[in-house]
Amino acid sequence: MKKRMMNMLGSPIRSAGRTMRRRLFIFFVSFTIIMLVGFFGIWVLAGRFAAGAQETEQLLNQELGHLSQNASRQYGEALMQAARMSEALSDGIEEWLAEAGIDPSELSAYPELLKGVEESQISPMLVFLDNTDCSGVFMVLDASVSPMLRGAHYSKAGLYIRNIEPHISGVVTSERLLLRGFAQFARGSLSMQAKWDLEFDVRDQPFWSEPIAAYENDPSLGRSRYVYWSATSALADLDERVTICSAPLVDSRGNVFGVAGFEISATNFTARHEADMSVYPRKVVAMGAWDGAGLALDTALFAGNATVYGAFPGGVTLHPVGSVAGMTVYEAGGASYVGVDTQIRLYPTDSPFASQRFAMVAAIPKGDYEDNVSRFNTALAMLVAVLLVVGVGVSYGASRSFVKPITDQLAYLERLDAAEGGAARPSMRGSGAGDVRPGAAGVQASGTGAPGATGEWSRGAAPGITGGWSRGIAGGGTGAGDVRPGADGADAMRFARQAGTGRRPGADGADGAVDGASQGTPANISTGSQGGAPGPVIPKTNIQEVDALIEKLLEIHATDNPIPADLFDSFIAKVNNLTPTELVIFRYTIQGDGVDEIAERMFISRGTLANHNTRIFRKLDVSSKDELMVYADLMARCGLLGEIL
């Protein structure tokens, strides 16, 4: 058995173990590398290594989608409220003037009535302001307190009231600032702002001229169709960017006598459209007029990183120059940005101003985008490297764990081989002149045999050999031999040596020597050493019945008892229960014939043969062909194989 294992696994044993470990290690490492390469290829095909760019695009699009919806809602509500407010203020002013018998179109001729007209509309204007998310409300009348002064044609009386932004003052109140109107109005909830003035200057102001011109051009449209959005402030001295909408004030006769509307300040826009800065802290969101070149930054409102958008130079446009990973590359003042944009519809489709375009852009500095993508891909590459290292480590551990039981058995056989060569052979020498040599059919010895020695292999044994593991086999001295007829003497000697040294039955050991004691001392067959010193112990198999047989045989030989004839009766009885066909297949199998050879001899397919073998194993109560061969080998060594053949 040892020779067969060493021929299969290689020699010497240590070299074979190392070779097996190396081959298994290479196999596992190769498998790990193939898996990683496969995952790597899938990631590449799926664009996973562009995931940093894709995640940026997705992040910006989500941000832009959310903010643009909020902006559309805020601006849309402001437009509708401006249309309603212009109608309400028109009716209110007309009613107030009706008491004095004056038509609104004649208001410019009665400047003394302007204070009363404005004061009567403060409360409704503040109500409309509270119903919007806007930062201010205004009303401009086509009249002047001082119509005779120079430039009075562009000076218009009216009101401009702004909310105090809570996040600036730190206190949430209903206090408002008066920027335009009579100073006497600055009382109660209204405070006069430092840049207060009495009237508006409407010179070259589109918020005044555009809605009035649109109404006069076609008065048949609904009031909301005349609401006009302007990126310039209604106040020339206002030091903050704003976007305002205005609608014409029209009396019941269809005469325009002013405009009214709302303001959305830069502070208001930033507070209500806060950008997510967690991934890209230098993100910028901008909204403004969009012409053919891009987004006009001078009049845009911003959210995001104030340091970035505060550095935009004046008079420049954020214009697209290319694309990367599904996003647009913009330039402004020599700096590059990566982002996405969307159109914001501020007008109804049938509005006279529907051709004007507004857009919102979410962008980040191009350098920030490139750094983030590089970090993402670096992290992904490090993950692959870590997986490779872990895979190599696991492969190394798995290869050692897999080979260890085999190398342990090989080492065990190596120790047995050393024990037989160095310790067992000298112990065979007694006081006689016997010279035991291996033979083909038994052991032939030279010398004078002891009287009474019987058995095939004991002929001519030296008189000095008086010890042995069984009288029937040792046959020395005055003992009488009791070897079962037909048993092969060499096989018996092999089994005796294997039993004495702890080796499995079935090993090829005819070239070894029987462990015995010199000078007539009995041999210790349970340990296989001289004088009873502990030796290697036979390891258990995974087959309980075979283990029991081996233990029984060891017990028999240790007590110098002959092998009982009924030791394998149970197995022989099971063999006798096989059908004629199964018995033929069984005999071919234990003779060592292969599957193809048996199938050819029996004129059956491999599948049919497999079914027969399954039934044979079940009837014999064995789990595999290997277990069946163990039984056959044990019976052959005990001279009982003829019982089943």
Image (cartoon, rainbow, N blue to C red):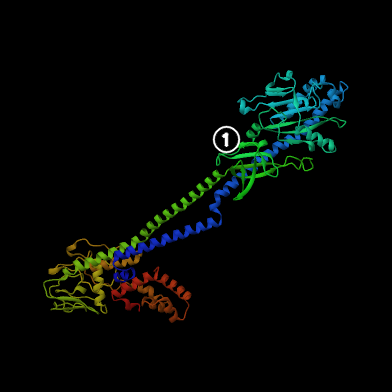
Image quadrant in which you'd find residue 626:
bottom left
**What amino acid does circle 1 point to?**
Thr
Q: Quadrant of the C terminus?
A: bottom left
What is the x, y in percent for residue 516? Answer: 18, 69
Q: Residue furthest left?
A: 431
What is the x, y in percent for residue 498? Answer: 25, 69
What is the x, y in percent for residue 455? Answer: 21, 78
Residue 196 relative to residue 458: left or right = right
Image quadrant in which you'd find residue 123:
top right
Categorize mark 1 by other alpha carbons within 10 Å: few (<14), some (14-19), many (20+): few
Is residue 286 visible from the viewing direction of this image? Answer: yes
Residue 643 relative to residue 604: left or right = left
Q: Which residue is mark 1?
A: 307
Q: Give the SS element for disc 1.
A: helix
Residue 158 relative to residue 618: left or right = right
Of 132 and 334, the residue lying toward us:
334
